[in-house]
Image: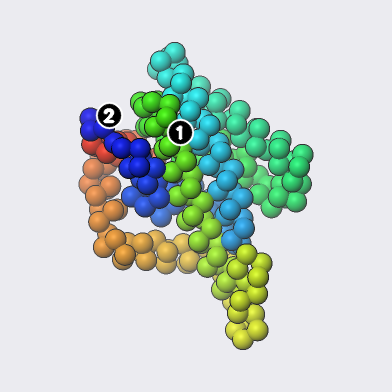
Amino acid sequence: MEKKSKLSIFTNGLIKENPILVLVLGTCPTLALSTAAMNGIYMGLALTFVLTCSNIFISALKRIIPDSVRIPCFITVIATFVTIVQLVIKAYMPELDGILGVYIPLIVVNCIILGRAEMFASKNTIVDSAIDGLGMGIGYMIALTFMGCVRELIGAGTVFGMAVTVNFLTPFSIATLPPGGFFVFGCIIALMNKLTKGKVREKQENKCMGCPGSSFCSKSQEGGCDQ
């Protein structure tokens, strides 16, 4: 298996395997929370913390976790960090708790988290797993925030709460509703495919075709899936 550089591991989640724009994972919170740009920042930070910490612990414990119960063990570790995030938000940021609501505890079953635990953290060093968690989390946050900016601008005429087009363009409120979310999401993915000429997605699909874990795994490692 080809050894990946630290920089390659980090940038992997930003473009080549972006959880939202390339792997199309975690679409439920993406569509629900991308009505405003700040929501993307908040949710992205929460997911990055959980993903990085769970990757570190799973990588550290990979040799002592029995293979037959690895998934329940992974979920237990992930749930621990999700609970920490949820309790901190409830205690110190009640307004944010009202915004993110049920989507914080749902991080436990987010296929991005479990997918990286199964396909990367359980097979790599602690340092590499931490870097992978940061890269994937930041890539998720960037994509979610960008989508939030687009929907907020079109639907409310603001970006991060600051007026941009409200004085000369009537906002299209449908952009902040579920139909608008699907439309904007599709347009952004189409733009991503256009900019990359479809090479990122085509390469991923060719490598993962026929793999039972391809629903939450892009290609596991740079050298291809080892399953």
Q: Nearer the viewer, residue 186 or 198?
A: 198
Residue 222 in percent (x, y) is at 27, 39
Left or right, 66 with reference to 180:
left
Cβ atoms under marks 1 and 2 closer than 8 Å? no
Count neighbours of disc 1 (C-alpha within 10 A) and say few if under 14, some if 14 to 19, many if 20 or more. Answer: many
Q: Amino acid at mark 1?
A: Ala
Residue at (40% x, 50% y) in the render: 14
Residue 221 in percent (x, y) is at 29, 36
Q: Amino acid at mark 2?
A: Gln
Secondary-structure class at tag 2: loop
Left or right, 178 with reference to 122:
right
Residue at (27% x, 29% y) in the render: 227
Residue lying at the far bottom of the rendered structure: 168
Left or right, 224 with reference to 75:
left
Residue under pointer 1: 130
**Quadrant holding the N terminus:** top left
Residue at (53% x, 31% y) in the render: 53
Q: Nearer the viewer, residue 17 or 217?
A: 17
Q: Quadrant of residue 115?
A: top left
Q: Quadrant of residue 102?
A: top right
Q: Is residue 142 above or below residue 86?
A: below
Secondary-structure class at tag 1: helix
Residue under pointer 2: 227
